[in-house]
């Protein structure tokens, strides 16, 4: 009964978090035109029932801008996390399956990428790919795969000791076919949990490099752009320009982290008793 209650609670929390994130993404996409609309007769208004997040120095609705920025961050997070997780899955599996020089080369790449300060690496990759949307996607996607690749490599090394894998090797089955038919199905839970847990890192790093001026262009209503522009007005008492977008970004990151935790609990039955 405790096992069932724990799994049921995990499913409910997972569904609620997904529903909120989908709602934010949809609302942001629908509010894109409203976020760009300017009206200088209502500039710098404090939060009120009419404008829950207030307005900025151009009279733009900060709630609409925040939702649009979060929607953009979620889309970028989904794309970059998916690309990064696929790179990790391929390299981690090939490294442990082929062994020898392939394992050495992948391990060297993992150590190299993890040895560079993360935010610096993301900034350099973003600059190399021309900044903007393409630069942000490339920078985040190509810098977040090593940790998951190392985890998957360890999982594959453990699975290689299983009787059915060793039997397939003795029967002359190729290593790539063993990886495709016998290893990948067992790696999927670990892969999906790692994929989801990469979302908050991707979103935070996208916002960070955009805030520093190495990411999305100022014309796009990204959270990093909003926070960067608000810094000039905090000393004049316009606290709502940074507080609400910042708290909203933290909330989205925590929701992604909660989704990853609930997926882990669902795919690891022993954890539902904790």
Image (cartoon, helix red, strand yellow):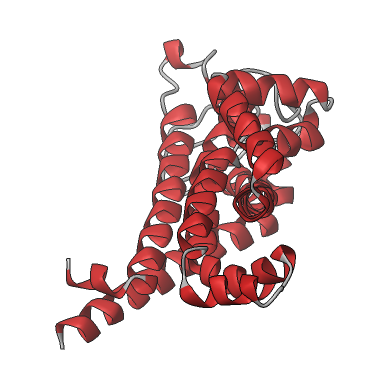
Q: Is 80 left or right of 47, judged from the image as shown?
A: right
Percent x, y for residue 24? Answer: 54, 58
Where 266 sits versus 234, above or below?
below
Please tell me which residue is depicted at 64% across the width and 42% down the height of the picture: 103
Percent x, y for residue 158? Answer: 45, 59
Q: How many marks?
A: 0
- Is residue 11 at least partly visible in the picture? yes
Q: Nearer the viewer, residue 105 or 249?
A: 105
Name the quadrant containing residue 209. Answer: top right
- Is residue 226 at least partly visible in the picture? no
Q: Nearer the viewer, residue 118 or 235?
A: 118
Please tell me which residue is depicted at 41% across the width and 31% down the height of the picture: 243
Quarter occupied by the N terminus: bottom left
Q: Is 11 left or right of 95, judged from the image as shown?
A: left
Name the quadrant containing residue 258. Answer: bottom left
Where 100 sits versus 20, above or below?
above
Name the outermost residue toward the right. 130
Please tell me which residue is depicted at 60% across the width and 35% down the height of the picture: 107
Percent x, y for residue 226? Answer: 59, 30
Where 193 sits versus 15, above or below?
above
Q: Nearer the viewer, residue 184 or 225?
A: 184
Name the quadrant containing residue 43. Answer: top right
Name the outermost residue toward the front. 170
Q: Nearer the viewer, residue 8 or 42?
A: 8
Quarter occupied by the C terminus: bottom left
């Amino acid at each position: 009964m405790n096992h069932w209650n724990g799994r049921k609670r995990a499913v409910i929390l997972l569904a609620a978090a997904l529903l909120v994130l989908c709602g934010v993404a949809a609302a942001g996409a629908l509010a894109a035109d409203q976020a760009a609309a300017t009206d200088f007769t209502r500039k710098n208004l404090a939060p009120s029932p009419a404008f829950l997040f207030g307005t900025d120095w151009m009279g733009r609705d900060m709630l609409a801008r925040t939702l649009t920025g979060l929607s953009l961050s979620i889309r970028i997070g989904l794309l970059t996390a998916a690309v990064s997780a696929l790179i990790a899955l391929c390299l981690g599996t090939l490294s442990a399956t082929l062994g020898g020089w392939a394992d050495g080369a992948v391990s060297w790449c993992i150590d190299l990428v993890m040895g560079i300060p993360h935010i610096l690496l993301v900034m350099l990759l973003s600059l190399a790919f021309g900044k903007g949307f393409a630069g942000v996607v490339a920078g985040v996607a190509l810098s977040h795969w090593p940790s998951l690749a190392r985890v998957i490599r360890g999982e594959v090394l453990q699975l290689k000791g299983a009787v059915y894998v060793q039997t397939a090797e003795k029967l002359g089955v190729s290593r790539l076919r063993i990886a495709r038919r016998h290893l990948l199905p067992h790696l999927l839970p670990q892969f999906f949990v790692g994929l989801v847990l990469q979302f908050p890192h991707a979103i935070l790093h996208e916002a960070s490099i955009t805030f520093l001026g190495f990411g999305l262009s100022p014309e796009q209503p990204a959270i990093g752009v909003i926070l960067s522009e608000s810094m000039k007005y905090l000393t004049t008492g316009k606290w709502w320009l940074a507080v609400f977008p910042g708290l909203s970004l933290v909330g989205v990151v925590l929701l992604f982290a909660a989704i990853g935790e609930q997926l882990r609990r669902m795919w690891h039955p022993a954890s539902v008793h904790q």
